[in-house]
Image: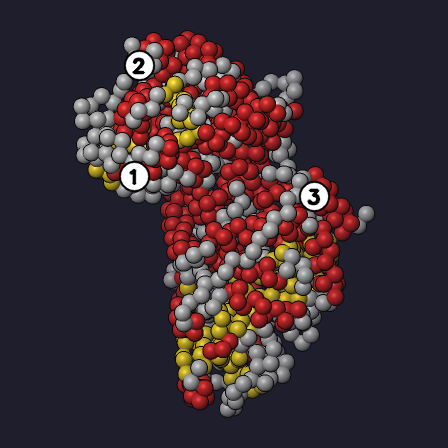
Amino acid sequence: MTSTFVGMPKFPVAAREALANTQLRSNLAHATATIRDKRARVVAEVDNWEELRLSGAAIKDAALASLDQHLVRLEARLTAAGAEVRWARDADEACTIVAEVAQRHGIDEVVKVKSMVTQEIGLNEALQEQGISAWETDLAELIVQLGDDLPSHILVPAIHRNRAEILEIFQRRMQGLASPEELTDDPAVLAGAAREHLRQKFLTARMAVSGANFAVAETGTLVVVESEGNGRMCLTLPEVLVSVVGIEKVVPTWEDLDVFLRLLPRSSTGERMNPYTSTWTGVTPGDGPQEVVVVLLDNGRTRALADQVGRQALRCIRCSACLNSCPVYERVGGHAYGSVYPGPIGAILNPLLKGVGVDEQVDSLPYASSLCGACFEVCPVRIDIPSVLVDLRAQVVDAHRAKRWGGVPSMQTVAMKGAAATFRSGRRLRLAERFARLGTGIAARVGARAWTGSRDLPRAPRESFRAWWRRTDGGTR
Amino acid sequence: MSARDEILDRVRAALGAVSTSSTTFGHPAGSSPDDVVALFAERVADYQATVVRCPPDELEAALRDALPAGRIVVPDALSVSVPHAVTDDRLTPFELDACAAVVTDCAVGIAETGTIVLDHGPGQGRRAITLVPDVHICIVRADQVVADVPDAMPRLAPAVRQGRPLTWISGPSATSDIELSRVEGVHGPRTLVVLLVG
Amino acid sequence: MRVALMVTCINDALFPDVGKACVTLLRRLGVEVDFPDAQTCCGQPMVNTGYLDEAIAPLRSFVKAFEGYDAIVTPSGSCAGSARHQHGMVARRSGDPELVAAVERTAPRTYELSEFLVDVLGVTDVGACFPHRVTYHPTCHSLRMLGVGDRPTTLLRAVRGLDLVELPRAEECCGFGGTFAVKNSDTSVAMVSDKARHVRETGAEVLVAGDSSCLMNIGGALSRQQAGIRVMHLAEVLAQTATGGGQS
C-alpha cells in the first residue's frame, strides 16, 4: 500500500538525491512550466485580480479571528441538517472516528475523494490496520497508490511521473481492465482505463471519505472542488459519507465563497472554473448519503493559529500555485520536503503544525528556499511565505539556542556571531578587512567548498571601498 | 475534557495570544461582458462541451437531435417532454449506469466561467442522475445566465439555505493529472450538451 | 539634499568598483554623496539565517551611520529590501524603542540605485555610453520585495550604443539566496546552472544586474563554464561615458 513519509532525511540530503534523477527533473520542468503558463493566462483575464487576492486574505483572516464562534455555528448548522459532528484533536483521533463509522456498518472497503487532510493524518494506513481498504479515486492519487509511491504535489500528487511511467504502473497493477494490452500512453486512454477500473467500485461503494475545500459556518455547507467526477461519485452514491475537515477551512458566509470560487480554479489548475464543484449541507432526504459524519480536525492548526506571523498560513486554500512557481520545487520535486505538504507552503506549514526544535527534518524546511518571493506573488490569499520562512528560521535558531545553552555551538552559529561582532562598527570592519580579507574569510567560514564546487569565487580586490575612500578622501585625491 | 471543548479552548487561547485586527473587505466586482449569453456559449464550448443555441419553439427538435440512442432518464417536472424517457424514481446506480443520457434543466448559467449550476430543484433531479449516465443534456434558458460568479451567489443562496445541494458543472468530466495536460472524460459524463434557449 | 551611499558589505569587501561607480555616477548627476564610515552591513545575512539577535549590532551601526540623511542610496535591491522591510522586525526584537524610532526614519529614506535615479532625481538618461550587447537579470528582491519594475531597463535602454537583449525566464531566481547557496548548495547550483545557460543563450557579452551577490553567483558559474561573458553591476554600466572612465 501507500508508503509514508516517516523517517525522511533533512531537506538538503533529500534534495541532492532528487537532483540526481534527470527523469524527475525533466518531468517536473515540463509539468510546472505547463501549469505556470495556464495560470498566467487565466489570471491575466481578471482585471481586479489583486483586489480579489486582498479580499480572499481578508475573509480568511476574519474567519480565523473568530474561529471559535464559526466552528460552534458550523457544528450547530450541520447537526440541524442531520449530520453527526465529531471533533478530533489529532491524527489518531480522526482516524479512529473514521474507522468506527465503517465498523458500525460492517464496512471493510471505502472509496476516497482526493484530500490533503486524510493524507496528512495517514488515514489509509490507519484504516488498513483495522482491516478496512481505502481506494483512492482521483487519477493522480490512484497512480501514487498503485505505484506504492508518495505524493509529491498538492494538486497533482503524481506530477513526478510522466505518461510512460504511468502506463507502466497501470499495466503492472491495475485490475479489472477488459483489455489491458490495448493500453497506450495517451493521457485520454489512461484516463479511460481509470474510469473502467473504478466504475464498479463507485457503483457498489457503501461508504466514502472526503475532505472539504471550504466549510460555510452560516449554512453548515461543505464544498468539494474537483475535476474528474470521482468526487461527485463518492459524495453522491454511497450510503455513508465521512468528511474530515481541518478547522481552518471555515468561511463565515455563503456569499464569502464567491471570492474563493474565483481565486481557486485559476490559481490551481489554471482554469476559469474546475469541471465540478459540489456543495452539500448535512443529509439531503432522498438524495445522496443518508448518513453524513463531519470530523473537525485540529492536528496542529491551533498551534499555527497561535503564531503571530505564521498564522497567515492557515489562509491557504491548497491551490499549489506556490509549488508551481517555486524554482526550488521545480528542481527537487515534492518528496524532498518529506511531507504531504511540499513546496513553499509545506516549508512553512509543516513547522507551524508540528513545532520547531524537535525534529531536524522539520527544522530544515524553513531553509529550503532562496527567499525569491515568487510564491508570495502568485498566492491567491497573499500568504507572505518569505516573511514566514524568515520568522520560522529565527524560531529554529532560538529553539537551538535554548537547547545548546552551555553546549557546543554549531559552525553556523560561530560564523554568525563572528560576523555580528565584525559588523558591530565601521572601525572593526575596517580592521577585519585589512587583516583578514573579509570577503574570502566569510566565504571560507560559511563553507567555501559548497560554493566552489561549481562556481568560481571572485578575486579579492587590492583594497576595500572603505580603504579607498579613506585613502583618496572620497576619490578627490 | 472532550475533544470539542479542548479544541475550542485551544482556539480561544491562540486567539488571545495574538493581536487580531478587524479587517474590512468588499467583494470585488465580477466581469460585465456586453453580451452575457454569447459569452456563456463561447466559454462553455471552450471546455469541449457542445452548445446548441435555439429559439424556444425549436427546443424539442434540438433536443431530439442531441439525444443518443438508448435509454434516456429525466427528472420529475422537466420543462420539456422527452418521448420514451424514463422518469427517475430512485433508480439504482446500476440502472442509471445502463442509461445512455440524462436531460435536465438548471438553476443558473455563469458566462465568465462557462458554468452551469444545478440546485437540484424541479426539473434537475437528485445528484446521481446527472452523474452516472455518460451524456448530460442540460437546458439553459437565456434569462438564467448571469455574468460572473458574484452574480450567481445570491440566486443560489435560497436553495443553499434550504439545505439543498448544488452541483457546479464546467464542461464534461476532465483531468489534468497526467503531465498537467487537460483531457476530457473521466468518471462524470464524458459528453455535455448545453441547449441554450432564447 | 544630503545623500549617503550605503555601499553594502559585499561591495565594500569584494566589489569596491561598484561603490566607486556609484560615486562617479551620482556626482556626474550633480549629487554630492557621502560615505558615512560607521556603516557595516544591513544585517540581512543574519536575519535571513534566523539570527535576529546577531542582527541588532549591525542595525545599530546602520542607524548611527545613516540617521540624518535625506536619502540613503544603495546599489543593491536586496540590502534596500532589508532596510525597508526587515529592520523594523530586528529593532522590535531589540526591545529598544529608540532603535525602533530610528528605523522608522531610515527605512523610508532608503533607495535602491535605480529607484533613486528615476524617482528622486527624475532621470532616465544618465548620459552613459556602453557600446555592447547586454542582457539584464532582474534580481528577486529588487523585483518582488521592492517592486523596481522597469526602472533598471529604462535606464539601460537610454545608454548610448547599448544593445539590450531579453533574458529567457529572466524573473526566475539565480539560486543565490544568501546562506541558501551553501546550506542547500546542490539546489542552488542546479538553479544557477540553468540561469547561466539562459544567459549564454542570449549571446550577450555582458550580464547586468542590480545586486553584486547575484552577480557573484551567476558570474561564478559563467566563469567556471568559461562562457566568456562578463558580469557588471548596473551602476558600473551607468557610470561609463563616451570617454570611458567608469571610475572616479
Q: Residue at x 47, y 24 (%)?
A: C42
Amino acid of disc 2:
Gly
The numbered mark at residue C230 is none
Q: Is residue A115 above or below residue A292?
A: above
Within-10-Å neighbours for mark 1: few <14, some 14–19, many 20+: some
Which residue is nearer to you in this view: B32 or B72? B32
- Give residue A475's mark: 2
For residue B15, the mark is 3
Quarter of the image that includes the C terminus of chain A: top left
Q: Residue at x 42, y 88 (%)?
A: B58
Subunit under mark 1:
C
Query: Which mark is nearer the camera, 2 or 3?
Result: 2
Counting from the top left corner in percent of width and height, residue C50 is at 55, 28
Image location (x, y in percent) of residue A127: 66, 55
Q: Is residue A31 above or below residue A423?
A: below
Query: CA gap, disc 3 to disc 1?
Result: 47 Å
Looking at numbered disc 3 in the image, what kind of residue is underneath it? Leu
Q: Position of residue B129 (x, y in %)?
A: 56, 77
- Answer with the quarter of the image where residue A16 lies: top left
Q: Which residue is mark 1?
A: C154
Q: Chain of mark 3?
A: B
Q: Is residue A83 left or right of residue A146?
A: right
Subunit of label 2? A
> Taking the image as drawn, is residue A23 in sight?
no
Secondary element at image label 1? helix
